[in-house]
Image: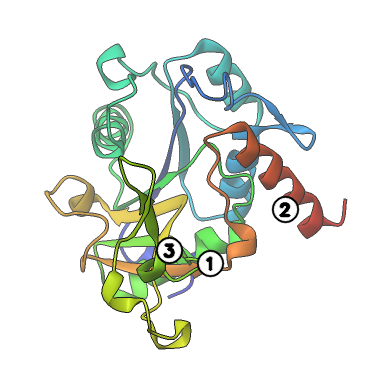
């Protein structure tokens, strides 16, 4: 099953892009210019170019984000309620709200993909790979992950008195190549069946299959230094 004909097995596909207007660490980061294009526009473009979706919906509480999203090809059929737009609301209820709105006002969707609004390194081919992984494995979720650059078993923390403490001191003498590889959320996309999104299933569990991305194409953007790193990576990848 390839993404081009996946709609024949599982119904229509919906993309949901959560994009609040209240980012604090990097103000207005969803709209900030990233290498010549608003940040959120890069996610919308990747979604459009993937040819995976029957509808691409941006869930936002911000009128300017809504306007820019429409300019780049996404739908903004509702304004997200305030109770779903604060710093503490997780993704699940936001995705469910968007899917429920579509079900009540438009159509039902068999699969839903939550796409990060701040993932400028996201590729349309990765979105297709995620859909194919979900269908081929018959899983509830397919999630983009990447490998930690350093063994997590060697991680250290700083104690209250300013000293170093290993999280796994029993691994102090282990060789790096003998330690189990660990992965983390790539913060790019989360494919899931409609039933999975509306169930109590946990995304990071055996309900999900991984879509492993190279580290050079993964950068979470929370701080200004993250933004600078992502722009440097983007330019290197695109030859700018």
Q: Quadrant of the N terminus?
A: bottom left
Q: Is mark 3 on a helix, strand or loop?
A: helix
Instruction: Calculate the distance from the C-alpha at mark 3 to the C-alpha at mark 2.
Output: 25 Å
The crowd level at tag 1 (other Cα within 10 Å; few <14, some 14-19, many 20+) is: few
Query: Could you tell which of marks 2 and 1 lies nearer the N-terminus?
Result: 1
Residue at the spot x=44%, y=22% of the render? 20
Residue 191, given in percent of the width and then of the height, sits at 37, 55
Q: Residue 161 carries which label?
A: none
Q: Nearer the viewer, mark 2 or mark 1?
A: 1
Residue at image point 60% right, 46% down: 48
Q: Name the residue under label 2.
A: 233
Do we see residue 33 in this rendering? yes
- Choose the circle earlier in sequence order: 3 or 2: 3
- The mark tally for this picture is 3
Task: Name which quarter of the figure residue 79 lies in.
Answer: top left
Note whether 181 is above or below 59 in the view shown: below
- Find residue 115 and report its horizontal and vertical position in percent: 46, 44
Horizontal side of 97 relative to 8 (left or right) equals: left
Residue 131: mark in rendering = 3
- Badge 3 local density, few (<14 within 10 Å), some, or many (20+)? many
Vertical arrangement, residue 143 with respect to residue 82, above or below = below
Does the CB distance between marks 2 and 1 fall below 8 Å? no
- In this view of the protein, which residue sits in the foreground, 52 or 238? 238
Q: Is 169 placed above or below 16 here?
A: below
Q: Where is residue 140 in the image (x, y as percent from the top left)?
A: 24, 62
Badge 3 or badge 1: first in the primary sequence: 3
- Choose top left, top right, bottom left or bottom right for residue 124: bottom right
Disc assigned to residue 149: 1
């Amino acid at each position: 099953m390839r993404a081009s004909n996946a709609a024949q097995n599982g119904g229509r596909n919906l993309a949901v892009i959560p994009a609040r207007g209240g980012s604090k660490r990097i103000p207005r980061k969803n709209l900030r210019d990233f290498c010549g294009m608003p940040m959120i526009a890069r996610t919308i473009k990747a979604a459009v170019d993937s040819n995976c979706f029957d509808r691409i919906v941006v869930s936002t509480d911000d009128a300017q984000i809504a306007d820019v999203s429409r300019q780049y090809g996404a739908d903004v059929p509702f304004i997200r309620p305030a109770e779903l737009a604060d710093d503490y609301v997780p993704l699940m209820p936001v995705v469910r709200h968007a899917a429920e709105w579509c079900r009540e006002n438009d159509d039902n969707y068999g699969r839903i993909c939550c796409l990060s609004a701040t993932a400028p390194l996201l590729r349309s081919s990765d979105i297709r790979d995620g859909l194919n992984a979900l269908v081929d494995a018959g899983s509830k979720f397919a999630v983009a992950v990447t490998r930690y650059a350093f063994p997590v078993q060697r991680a250290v923390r700083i104690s209250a008195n300013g000293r170093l403490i290993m999280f796994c001191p029993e691994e102090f003498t282990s060789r790096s190549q003998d330690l189990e590889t660990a992965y983390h959320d790539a913060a790019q996309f989360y494919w899931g069946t409609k039933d999975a999104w509306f169930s109590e299933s946990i995304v990071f569990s055996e309900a999900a299959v991984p879509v492993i991305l190279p580290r050079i194409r993964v950068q979470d953007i929370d701080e200004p230094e993250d933004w600078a790193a992502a722009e440097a990576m983007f330019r290197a990848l695109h030859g700018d």
